[in-house]
Each structure stands twice: as C-alpha cells, then as structure tokens.
Amino acid sequence: MPRRLFILLPLVCTLIACQPVRNAQQTVALADSLRVNEGVTCDDSLALDEAYFTLGRWRLVYPSAYARACYYYGRMLRNRNDQVSAMRAFISGTHAPYLQRVVPLPWFTDYHILGRIYSNMGTMCHHAGEFELSYDMYKSSAEQFNRRDETTLYHYARNAMALQLAEQCKHDEALSLIYAIEQECTNANVRTKLWETKAILYYNIAFYDSTIYAVNQLQQEGNHETTGYVKEAQAFWHLQQYDSALYYAKVVMDHPYASDQDKYHMLYILMKHDSSTGKEDVQALSSARADLDAEVIEPLLQQLSAAVEVLRQDLDKKPHYIYLCFLLASICLIVGVAWVAKNHIKKVTIIEQEKHQQLSKRNTEIRADIKQLQTSNKALRQENNDLQIMHYAHQEKIIQEIENNCIAINQSKDWKQELHWKDYNAFCETVDRYFLLLATKLKTTNKLEEKEIRLCILVLLEMDNFTIAKTINYAPNGIGKYKYRIAQKLGTTIRELRQFLIEMAIGR
C-alpha cells in the first residue's frame, strides 16, 4: 500500500496543480468566443485577473495561452481607463514568445493575438501623440498578421501605418503606402478605411476641399464614425463655411459613440461660431469644454503619456547578461555534444567497417564450405543412385527366384504331399525361405489366420480357384469372395494381390 501511495502522490499533486491552469485556459477561451461571435471582450475582471497571473506562472509551458490572457486583460484595463496597467499587460504579451526576450520558444504559435497586442499598443501611442512610436507598433502588428497570412488584418495594420505617417506630415511616404494598399487589397472595409486616412492626410496638409471630398466618399461607403465628421467640420471651419461646420459639429455632439476628444474639439467650434447661441450658452459651452478637458482629456493624456513612457523603458531595456551567458553556454554545449557525437560516429563507422570486412571474409569461407558440401552431396547422391540400382537388381533376382520355385512346385506331381501342407511352416521352408518370411509377416503384422495365410501362399503359387478350394477345404464358388476379404485386410485389390504378396515376401 505505501508503494502505491508513493506512485500516486505525484500524479495527484500534478492534477491539483494543473486545475488552476485549466480554469485560466477556459476563461481565455470564453473571451475568445465572445470576441469572435459577439464582437465584445470579456469584462469579468476577477476571472481575467486570475487567468493573467496564473498563466504568467506557467508562461514558458503555455506561451500562446499567456499571450491571449495578456491581450484580454489589457483590453479590459483600457476600457476601465487604467492605461498604464494595460500597457504593462500588453508588454508582457509581447514577451510571451521568448525566454527573457532572448531565446525564442518554438512552441509559441499564436501570432494573430500578438498582432492584436501590437495594434492596441499602436492605438495607445497614437492617442498620446507619439506617432513615430505608434508607427513602429503598427509595423510589428502587420508583420505578425503577415506571418499568419491574414491579409485583411495585415492591410488594416498597414493603413494604420499610413495614418501615422500622415500625422507626422510625411505626406509622400503616406501617399505611397496608401497607393500600394489600394493596388494589393480588395477588401471593401479596408478600402473604406483608406478614405479616412486620406481625409486626415489632406487635412494635415491643409487641402480642405480634398478633405471634404474624402469624408463624403467615406460616408458613401457606409462609414459614419465620428472621425470623418470631425475632420469635415474642421475643414469647413478652415474654409470659413461656418454653417456647414456647425452642422457637422452638432452631428458629432449628438452621435452616441462620439469620443470625449472629438466632443472637446467640436465644443470649440460651437462656442465660437454658433450665432444662435447666447452669451450664457457660450459661457456654458466654454465651461463644459474646460470641465471635459480637466476631468477626461487631461487625465487620459497623462495616463497615456505614462503608458508610453513604460513602453519606451521596456524597449530600451537590454537583455540580462546572465541570459546571454546562458545562451552562449547552451551553444557551446550543443557544439561540444555535436563534436563528441561526430567523433563517436566516426569510431562506430570504423568499427562497423572492420566488422563488415570480417563478415565478408567469413562469408567467403562459408561459400567455399558450401561449395565443397555441394560437391560431396553430389557424390553421395550418385553413390545412393548406384546402390538403389543394385538393390532393385537384387530384388528382381529374388523375384525371379520365387517365380522359378513357384513354377517348379506347379510342375510337381504330388506337391501337396511332398511339401508338408499340413504344417505350413515346414511347407514354406521347403518351398522357399521367403515364403516363411511372408507367412510370419502375415501372421504377426496383418493378423491373418492360418487358413488365410495358406490361401495367400496358394495365390502366390498361381493356383486356380478350384485347386485352392480343394486344398483348403473351401467351396469353389466362395474363393473369389475369400480373396476379396483378404485383399481388403492387406489394403490392396484381388488383381494386385499376388504382386503385393511378392513385394511383401522380399521386404519392399
């Protein structure tokens, strides 16, 4: 019993340890299902928090699951305006495919979720005004999507790259990238997004008419997000078409999904150029804009700036020296093992060659012995054939001797009296020594009676049925049946009975 407990205890401990990991994986799978099927993320903070930290302890074993937990946990923190913690979670997700950012883990496969992580980091950098860093994040996102051959998401990421170039006023590079996406991508949603990027690009280079045209194209494609309306309102404001600017500003303010930043910009247009607004209303709008800036915009920008600073520190952080030493030691160990294995294989090859030569020599000797044995067997077969020929010749001589004796007995006038018929042993000895041998075999081996043995000897002497019946005191008509029964006992037929008895007599 103690031995059984000793064997089962590690298994029980392993099952207990793996239960939290299974629960964490189920939480991540639920978040995946909600995102794919319903377009929302899991908002169970307790479950996601536990999954994030549990899989963090097992991240070297389950790096793909840990990356997904980092993504959903970071998305939840972003929705709750905890931008710094969200950035830390995303950074942990980017480290999931590596051992301390040095050694890649070959069993990491979820590059899709890694692309989404980089995309969220790029969005946070964009809102913080760090367009160059945002461009790098979106570029990393595009690389991850390209590794999975996810064409649509890859072009979405490239469109975001073009947007960051536009925000940096790198107009030629942005236009070149937009043109390349239009040539390569056929997805309608991506091409619609390109009009939004063009609108922002045209607005940044003060092409306000082109900005309005791009926004109109965006709306015709069915995209009614507030970004296009904001740019259109600002473009009309710069063109001094204040009525149109006020119209689109009110559209943004009434839009249910308008962001606080968009409302902040539209409050300025409403406050400055709405002729129907009284002095008190202007003061109210100004106060609302100030409150929005103080309560939402400024804290959000501060958090985003802090999150970007965390990202910069992570990017500037160099891999720890001990892990580089570990990597170098591992490489040296692998090279050493390979060298030892190579020498061992060389020695084994030499030994195998020597064994092969010995086997070849032994095979040559065996072939020579086999050839000699074949020659000997051929001589033995020839000698055996000669002996069989001599044996058959001797048998034929004996058969001829028996036939001559039978003829002599048939020609005798009083053979019955002379050959002591009553004593068939004496009779057999008088006739031929082979008859006695035959009588002995028929009696001992075939269990024939005396009368049957006599009949067999008379058959061997070629007596007719009448003479046989007279000699053994049997009815002449029944001799044929009698012969038939004896032939059956001996395993032959009446026609071949005499030849069978001759062969038995000579011992064939």
Image (cartoon, rainbow, N blue to C red):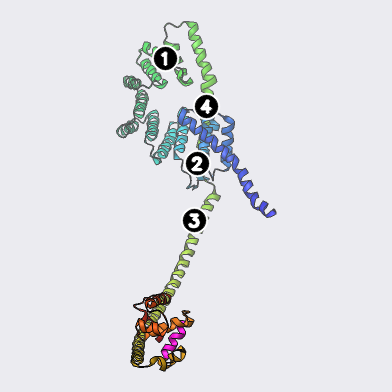
User: Label 4 amino acid?
Assistant: Asn
Q: Is residue 500 above or below residue 63?
A: below
Instruction: Quote the CA–CA distance across marks 3 and 2.
Output: 26 Å
Q: Is residue 340 left or right of residue 458?
A: right
Crowd class of label 3 (few under 14; some 14 to 19; many from 20; radius 10 Å): few
Helix, strand, or loop for circle 1? helix
- At 61% from the left and 46% from the top, the residue drawn is 14
Task: Choose the circle earlier in sequence order: 3 or 4.
Answer: 4
| Magenta residues (range) | 433-442
Mark drawn on residue 251: 1
Q: Is residue 485 above or below residue 128?
A: below
Which mark is nearer the camera, 3 or 2? 2
Helix, strand, or loop for circle 3? helix
Mark drawn on residue 425: none
Of residue 381 and residue 324, the one placed in the foreground of this image is 381
Of residue 405 and residue 181, the one placed in the foreground of this image is 405
Instruction: Quote the CA–CA distance across marks 4 and 2.
Output: 23 Å
Q: Residue 100: give x, y in percent of width and height.
A: 53, 45
User: Label 1 amino acid?
Assistant: Val
Q: Residue 175: give x, y in percent of width and height.
A: 32, 30
Mark drawn on residue 64: 2
Mark drawn on residue 331: 3
Residue where numbered disc 4 is placed: 79
